Amino acid sequence: MGPVRKVRPGLTAAGAGMAGDRVVAAGSTARILVGATARALRGSDCADLGHAGPVSRFAGTPEPVRRAAAIRSAGRIALTAGQAAEVDAERVARWFVDQYPRRRYPGVLLGSPHGGVAHLAVALGMPWLPAGFEMIAHWPQGAVDRPRAALDHGAALAGRVLAGNPDLHVRQVHCPASRGALAGATVALTGRWRALSAAYRSFLTDRLAPGAPVLVLRDTRTWPVVDAADGHSFQLGCPASGLNPVDFHPDSHALRQVLRSAGGDSAHWEPPEISAPPAAAEHGVESGFDRSVRDWTSRHGHPLHQILVPTPEALSAATADLYRHWLRAAGKTGDRLVVECGRLLDPWQVLRAGLVPYWCENATRRSVEQVEWWLAGSESFTSIDVLPEPPGVRSPALAGLPQWLAVAGFGRRRRALDRTSARGYPVTSVPTRRATEVLRAQPYDLPNPAPLATGEALAALRDGGSHHGLLIC
């Protein structure tokens, strides 16, 4: 493990907790999306967002060397057990809201992280605020193939977090398929608010125009979960892995491949018993948070709308269709597509260039197949740029470069797969600013369209997403 920052003893979440940018995991979806959305609302791109991990320098080295480099890098920024006790969810919420320009907004989006919601927020001229945040903490003497030990260690960390943050629920995710060797060196915890934080309430009160709508986006995917303790639950695997819950069974061939790649052994894999029915996966929204938003909007006279997302591609397809219609209504072609992936997105550059955005949650075959199906059923695009984010790990669920090339092949004239992202795929990493560098090369298509009205956007999402299972209420 690399060196970690020293902390002063005696600090608790009730006192002077750590700053939000130290608590929220670097590269986590919520962190990237808030940063990208806030920049776009300020009229700037993501050129300063994200940094390449050390594995990007080890594309040609053996697997153990890459694993060691990734673990050392994670060790420098992961929270210690002492720092877990200093987590202050209220400071995290303030850090999120303070990134947005101080002005009145025509509405706000809250809830689950999704790249499409950043593009939707920018089209509406609204901020987006997450209903939870991810943390990464040290796991000394951890092992990627020991989920029971991960649960035990995570329970102690979750207890420290919850001691100072009773309004949180902590979901622990142990997923070697999406995190590789890091799942054996660090613990991934998602803190989900059980109610609107004070910072969020102040933001809604001070920054929303009178009668402005509040939109709550909910990822409705479910996953088997262990209720480890009051306020702490444990999840083995995750939807974003591209695998199914059954693939994390000890007899699974896919699991054996995943653990071998991450330096583990499936013979040691003894998962905790799961007796409860599947619950909302890690990016779900707590029912208490939902109630709190409903109560606030009712008391303050703001309309509330729910966007229920059964799969990421449902919102991605509906948002892309909405953008195409919006651009064409403004006199633009709407015939140039960018396929983003994971952290590789830039809402401001998409808007500046008049592009249609489609966001893939990750580089799994499942995600890429869905964009292929959407393209096959859509009016063709003259130009398609594809930004495949290398996940930094190997997994049987990942799409190969030929599948990504097939996506670009749908373009009539321009078919571009970013070479930098493809170089060393899938084991390297590239920063968010790589998307900015690619999209800056696109020609300008100004002026920008007038902001979308909320009613128009919801109607378009309802019409374009209903056959994908997207529900607007």
Image (tube, rainbow, N blue to C red):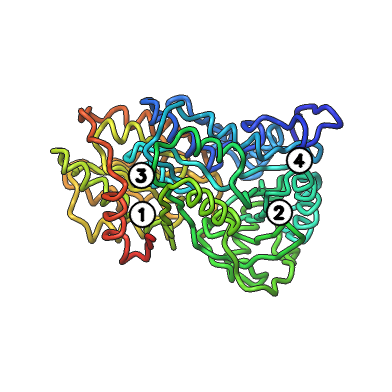
Relative horizontal placement of residue 8, taking residue 102 as reference (left or right): right
Question: Comparing marks 4 and 3, which lies closer to the viewer?
Answer: 3
Instruction: Say whether disc 1 or disc 4 marks the residue closer to the N-terminus.
Output: 4
Residue at 35% of width from left, 36% of height from top?
Answer: 125
Tell me, for residue 403, which label it has, or none. Answer: 1
Question: Comparing marks 3 and 1, which lies closer to the viewer?
Answer: 3
Which picture quadrant has residue 472? bottom left
**Which residue is the site of mark 2?**
144
Mark 4: secondary structure: helix
Instruction: Say whether disc 2 or disc 3 marks the residue closer to the N-terminus.
Output: 3
| Quarter of the image that includes the C terminus | bottom left
Residue 327 to residue 292: above or below: above
The amino acid on which the numbered mark 1 sits, given as a three-letter code, is Gln
Q: Among all residues in the image, which is located at the extreme left?
A: 331
Relative horizontal placement of residue 151, taking residue 219 as reference (left or right): right
Mark 1: secondary structure: helix
Instruction: Say whether disc 4 or disc 2 marks the residue closer to the N-terminus.
Output: 4
Percent across and percent down for residue 11 are 81, 32
Residue 17 to residue 164: above or below: above
**Which residue is the site of mark 4?**
84
Residue 137 to residue 94: above or below: below
The answer for how far apart the CA atoms under marks 3 and 1 are is: 27 Å
The answer for how far apart the CA atoms under marks 1 and 4 are is: 41 Å
Mark 3: secondary structure: helix
Percent across and percent down for residue 223 are 58, 65
